[in-house]
């Protein structure tokens, strides 16, 4: 009799529970499922179909299937190739510094000290801002004639003449990546700090008794313990950064001359300015493939490594 | 031994201080800019604190643009979408936390996927859908879409909060004759107010910040949100940085305050949501 009043969260519950609560479960999930099906999955499905159609806002009378034509057009577009390569730089060079600096910040905040709460509140606030605003703020700081970053770099003696950050293609790409690093460190610091605080203190005490120093502790206890969190967080972040157009949109809008477009801003431009929904959808389909392949590869690779460690 | 500890402390203080400056400076700079008179905006040498502090940028933006309308729209929109998301996410999260049932993994996976795919693929079909519903240039389009966007993540976040509360709590209430729903509202909800607040604030801030759907659906003064309005301040060739910096500061203040309050719980919810989810 006691088992019937047991919490229902345990796995492998007797089946009659299901029928008893079936209707309740169904009704509670229904609003969420309806909304997501109609307004996320249905448009997505239609969008994928559009990728194989001639579908342009200027040519709405002539919507028809054209096979892989959109993909061919996109592949032949120099702008697409550039966005593809930029996407790689954008993700890789944003992610690594975000991760490393975020990790160091988290390590330093792990132990309580006076004022830690206030410190956290301050360094976490980029997180409350939108990518659009971050892009605007950096655009102002990198401004050619009166940008404060040039001024600071010159005052520090790092450069002699002002750098045309947003007018030069290479510097523009560096600029959007640096702004993105600034934005993203916080996320990693938050996630890693939360993971660090879940490590039982006894593990460190045991290591201290064994005479292990800080660095061995880091590699023998800290990193192995939070490794699953690190792996998942990093994967989610890669996907998120690839899909993140807001900052580039307001900082450079892909310019100068398309040199800072990534796949998501390239696609957005096709929608907002080009009005060619078929081609935009084709870019989106390619992105989905990239994300799926990357995720599978990444998960296989990290599992493989983990197995190798032990 | 003592000296090593001190060296470590010094490194830590220096690193954390530099990082603080690095993080806070852009926000400081946009704030300082917003206090500068137009004439001093571009003067050289650059002033790191304005000689003549002025609020003219703030006054201008309120006088020239309909900033009060944008603020009202954004507030209304984020509040409504946040509140509806919270209700839907509470129901869904509760069920996902408390029951095992067929298709549960698939439901969570379906939610998870919505966070991972480039949603722009569906932007054009969505626009057509919204025209059919006659919602273009009207705020309900965004209320609806923001709710749709927030529900999956908030549901998983709420699931995490529910899992921390022992189910013996509502079992006891149900033994006393409460129905499951009234047990949920009378017993469980009151204990998890921080979690509810965090989920609401998270959704509110996301809606407050959203740009692209709003650009797609809204092109009328009366229905513009703050991000749409700010986007229209950017012209092809120039940006009025005085107005822009004041608008940035105004639009960021509510989110900063909300996040400062709810930060701890949002972090808990997010780590629950994205790692265990």
Image: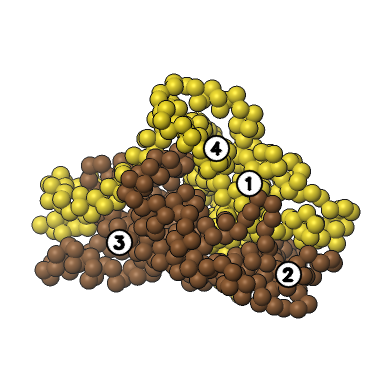
**Quarter of the image where one finds residue B4:** bottom right
Chain B colour as displayed? brown
| Residue located 64% across and 29% down the image | A78
The answer for how far apart the CA atoms under marks 1 and 3 are is 37 Å
Label for residue B87?
3
- The disc numbered 3 marks a residue on which chain? B
The answer for how far apart the CA atoms under marks 2 and 1 are is 25 Å
Say which residue label 2 marks.
B38
Badge 3 crowding class, 10 Å Cα cut-off, few under 14, some 14 to 19, many 20 or more, is some
Helix, strand or loop at mark 2: helix
- The disc numbered 2 marks a residue on which chain? B
Helix, strand or loop at mark 1: loop
Label for residue B85?
none
Helix, strand or loop at mark 4: helix
Are the residues under badges 2 and 4 in a single subunit?
A: no
Whether pointer 2 and pointer 1 mark residues with C-beta atoms closer than 8 Å, the reply is no
Say which residue label 1 marks.
A253
The answer for how far apart the CA atoms under marks 4 and 1 are is 14 Å
| Residue located 40% across and 44% down the image | B127
The answer for how far apart the CA atoms under marks 2 and 4 are is 36 Å
Say which residue label 4 marks.
A274
Whether pointer 1 and pointer 3 mark residues with C-beta atoms closer than 8 Å, the reply is no
Q: Is residue B221 above or below residue B31?
A: above
Name the front one of labels 1 and 3. 1
Helix, strand or loop at mark 3: helix
């Amino acid at each position: 009799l006691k088992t019937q009043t047991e919490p229902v969260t345990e796995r492998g519950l007797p089946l009659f529970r299901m029928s008893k609560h079936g209707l309740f479960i169904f009704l509670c999930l229904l609003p969420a499922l309806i909304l997501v099906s109609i307004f996320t999955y249905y448009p997505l499905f239609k969008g994928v179909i559009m990728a194989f159609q001639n579908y342009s806002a200027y040519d709405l009378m002539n919507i028809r299937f054209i096979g892989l034509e959109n993909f061919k057009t996109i592949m032949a577009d120099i702008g697409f190739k550039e966005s593809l390569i930029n996407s790689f730089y954008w993700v890789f060079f944003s992610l690594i510094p975000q991760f490393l600096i975020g990790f160091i910040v988290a390590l330093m905040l792990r132990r309580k000290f006076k004022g830690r709460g206030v410190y956290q509140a301050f360094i976490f606030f980029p997180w409350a801002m939108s990518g659009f605003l971050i892009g605007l703020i950096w655009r102002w700081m990198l401004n050619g004639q009166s940008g404060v970053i040039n001024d600071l770099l010159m005052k520090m003696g790092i450069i002699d003449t002002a750098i045309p950050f947003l007018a030069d293609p290479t510097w523009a790409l560096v600029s959007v990546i640096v702004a993105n690093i600034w934005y993203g460190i916080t996320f990693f610091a938050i996630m890693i700090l939360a993971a660090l605080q879940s490590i039982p203190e006894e593990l460190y005490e045991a290591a201290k008794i064994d005479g292990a120093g800080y660095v061995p502790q880091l590699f023998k206890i800290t990193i192995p313990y939070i490794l699953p969190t690190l792996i998942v967080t990093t994967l989610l972040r890669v996907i998120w950064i690839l899909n993140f157009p807001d900052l580039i949109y307001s900082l450079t809008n892909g310019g100068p001359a398309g040199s800072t477009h990534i796949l998501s801003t390239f696609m957005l431009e096709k929608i907002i300015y080009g009005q060619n929904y078929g081609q935009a959808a084709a870019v989106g389909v390619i992105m989905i493939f990239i994300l799926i392949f990357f995720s599978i590869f990444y998960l296989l690779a990290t599992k493989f490594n983990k197995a190798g460690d032990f | 031994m003592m000296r090593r500890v001190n060296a470590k402390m010094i490194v830590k203080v220096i690193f954390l201080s530099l990082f603080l400056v690095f993080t806070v400076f852009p926000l400081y700079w946009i704030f300082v800019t917003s206090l500068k008179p137009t004439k001093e905006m571009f003067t050289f040498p650059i002033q790191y604190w304005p000689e003549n502090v002025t609020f003219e940028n703030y006054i201008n933006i309120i006088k020239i643009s309909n900033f009060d309308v944008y603020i009202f729209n954004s507030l209304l929109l984020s509040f409504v979408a946040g509140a509806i998301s919270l209700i839907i996410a509470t129901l869904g999260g509760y069920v996902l936390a408390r029951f095992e049932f067929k298709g549960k993994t698939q439901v969570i996976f379906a939610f998870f996927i919505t966070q991972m795919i480039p949603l722009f693929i569906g932007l054009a079909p969505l626009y057509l859908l919204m025209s059919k519903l006659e919602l273009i240039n009207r705020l309900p389009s965004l209320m609806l879409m923001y709710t749709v966007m927030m529900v999956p993540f908030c549901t998983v976040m709420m699931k995490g909060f529910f899992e921390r509360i022992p189910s013996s709590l509502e079992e006891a209430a149900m033994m006393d004759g409460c129905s499951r729903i009234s047990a949920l509202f009378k017993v469980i909800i009151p204990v998890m107010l921080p979690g509810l607040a965090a989920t609401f604030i998270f959704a509110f801030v996301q809606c407050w910040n959203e740009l692209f759907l709003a650009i797609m659906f809204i092109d009328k003064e009366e229905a513009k949100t703050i991000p749409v309005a700010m986007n229209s301040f950017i012209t092809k060739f120039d940006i009025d940085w005085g107005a822009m910096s004041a608008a940035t500061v105004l639009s960021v203040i509510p989110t900063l305050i909300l996040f400062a309050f709810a930060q701890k719980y949002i972090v808990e919810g997010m780590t629950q949501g994205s790692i265990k989810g």
